[in-house]
Image: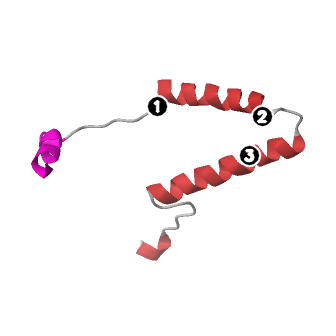
Amino acid sequence: MRDDDFYIGGPRDYDEQTDAFRFDLDDLVHRYVDEFDLNTITMVGALQEKINELINTGNIEFEMDEDFFNDEEDEI
């Protein structure tokens, strides 16, 4: 297979993926404001529930380097 045989149809890097998520979220919120009778407090409550769900089931892992805190001390 040649390199040009591969097709990536979506955002390639983390920043593009974040932007795509934000644009989709904006479109979704505007659609619900325009097409539904939900008030913004109800929408904010639903979003907050989703935030809590994502926080509790998130997939974030962070490992600090051994000298993570030492770097800050060296700069002072």
Q: Residue furthest front?
A: 76
N-terminal label among 1 and 3: 3
Disc 1 designates what residue?
58
Q: Nearer the viewer, residue 11 or 44?
A: 44
Number of residues whose C-alpha sits closer than 10 Å to that of mark 3, classed few (under 14), some (14–19) or many (20 or more): few
Left or right of 46, for residue 3: left
Q: Nearer the viewer, residue 10 or 33?
A: 33
N-terminal label among 1 and 2: 2
Identify which amino acid the numbered label 2 is placed on: Thr
Q: Which residue is drawn at 61% across and 50% down?
A: 22
Disc 2 designates what residue?
40
Q: Which residue is drawn at 57% across and 30% down?
A: 51
Task: Choose top left, top right, bottom left or bottom right for residue 72.
Answer: top left
Which of labels 2 and 3 is toward the front? 2
41 in magenta? no
Describe the element under mark 2 as helix, strand or loop.
helix
Identify which amino acid the numbered label 3 is placed on: Leu
